């Protein structure tokens, strides 16, 4: 007798920097959602697909819920978070071990009561005193009726199998939604822009990333070579100088590291040309935001 196949959508929510994108990448075994230690790294809804013999899990990574810098970009990101919790089968509410503040509380208040919500306590590997975990779990459990509570270390792949089994229990019976070999519904053009933006976050200071976006202006296949021209949009001339660096060294480092990640993800050679444009107020300009693919 064969077991019934299950499939469904699982939204991952939480405040910035709790490790939602790292969790998604490690669950599906491929880097499709960019990561950094800075808030606002994830700005779009990203779908990652895990298919095994018995089930298909369609994970939806969302931006961290924003409570500061309320421009049109961040308001749109918050709408993505709230809309992503509708019409799904399971919600994963991700917390950082031993950390719960007003930002987490804001997300908790938005959690649906008509959908199973699994509490995922991430970064347990950084806890020095593991005995503090149980009291922390007991305290959070009084705040909401969770379908399950699973402590994990997404970065170290610990307890992710347990999390997958907890999710599987709540997926409805049904055929696969995507082909078995698909890992995301995002195209290579989008992924290229995201990988470049990730390197900007990782190789620049605190201020710059929040006033930066990336627009892929050309993506062409020439045989097995991908030829990509990308524009980095910044808010001020001073930001442009910071991004380019002395003698262009900073921009070259960013572009090189992005290209290497693209070649790994796309499994082929990439020619990447990057330049910087000043476009003041882009994060509050609905027309520009739409052209960049923000919802």
Image (cartoon, rainbow, N blue to C red):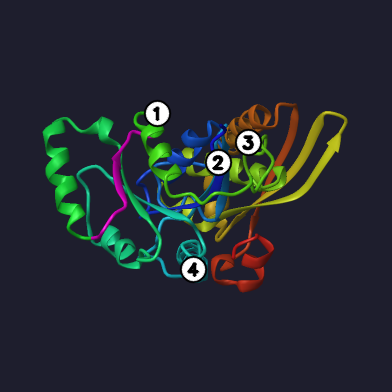
Q: Position of residue 36 (x, y in %)?
A: 44, 41
Q: Position of residue 134 (x, y in %)?
A: 15, 40
On the rendered structure, is 92 left or right of 217?
left
In-front residue for pair 9/262: 9
CB contact under 8 Å: marks 2 and 3? no
Residue occupying image coordinates x 55% and y 41%? 4
- Which of the two marks, 2 or 3, is nearer to us in this view? 2
Distance of label 1 from label 4 (alpha carbons) = 30 Å
Q: Which residue is mark 1?
A: 157
Q: Position of residue 115 (x, y in %)?
A: 40, 61
Image quarter where the N terminus lies is top right
The disc at residue 255 is 3
Kindly indicate the quadrant of the structure image that contains residue 90.
bottom left
- Helix, strand or loop under label 4: helix
Decide which of tag 4 and tag 3 comes sooner along the chain: 4
- Helix, strand or loop under label 3: helix
Decide which of tag 1 and tag 2 comes sooner along the chain: 2
Distance of label 1 from label 2 (alpha carbons) = 27 Å
- Which of the two marks, 4 or 3, is nearer to us in this view? 4
Question: Relative to residue 15, is residue 265 depicted above or below?
Answer: above
Q: Which residue is mark 4?
A: 79
Question: Relative to residue 182, is residue 46 depicted above or below?
Answer: below
């Amino acid at each position: 007798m064969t077991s019934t196949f299950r499939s469904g959508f699982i939204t991952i929510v939480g405040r910035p920097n709790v490790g939602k994108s790292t969790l998604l990448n490690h669950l599906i075994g491929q880097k499709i959602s960019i990561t950094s230690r800075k808030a606002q790294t994830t700005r779009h809804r990203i779908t990652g697909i895990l298919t095994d013999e018995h089930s298909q899990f369609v994970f939806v990574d969302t931006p961290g819920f924003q409570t500061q810098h309320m421009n049109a970009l961040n308001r749109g990101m918050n709408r993505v978070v709230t809309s992503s919790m509708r019409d799904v089968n399971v919600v994963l509410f991700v917390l950082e071990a031993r950390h719960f503040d007003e930002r987490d509380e804001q997300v908790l208040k938005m959690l649906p009561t008509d959908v199973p919500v699994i509490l995922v306590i991430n970064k347990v590997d950084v806890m020095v005193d593991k005995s503090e975990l149980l009291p922390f779990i007991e305290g959070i459990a009084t705040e909401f009726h969770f379908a399950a509570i699973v402590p994990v270390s997404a970065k170290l792949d610990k307890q992710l199998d347990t999390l997958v089994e907890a999710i599987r229990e709540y997926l409805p019976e049904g055929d696969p939604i995507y082909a078995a070999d698909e890992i995301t519904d995002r195209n290579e053009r989008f992924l290229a822009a995201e990988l470049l933006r990730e390197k900007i976050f990782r190789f620049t200071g605190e201020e710059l990333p929040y006033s930066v976006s990336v627009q892929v202006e050309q993506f062409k296949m020439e045989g097995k070579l991908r030829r990509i021209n990308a524009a980095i949009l910044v808010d001020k001339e001073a930001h442009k100088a910071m991004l380019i660096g002395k003698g262009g060294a900073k921009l070259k480092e960013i572009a090189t590291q992005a290209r290497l990640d693209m070649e790994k993800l796309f499994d082929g050679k990439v020619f990447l040309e990057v330049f910087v444009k000043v476009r003041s107020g882009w994060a509050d300009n609905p027309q520009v935001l739409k052209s960049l693919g923000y919802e």
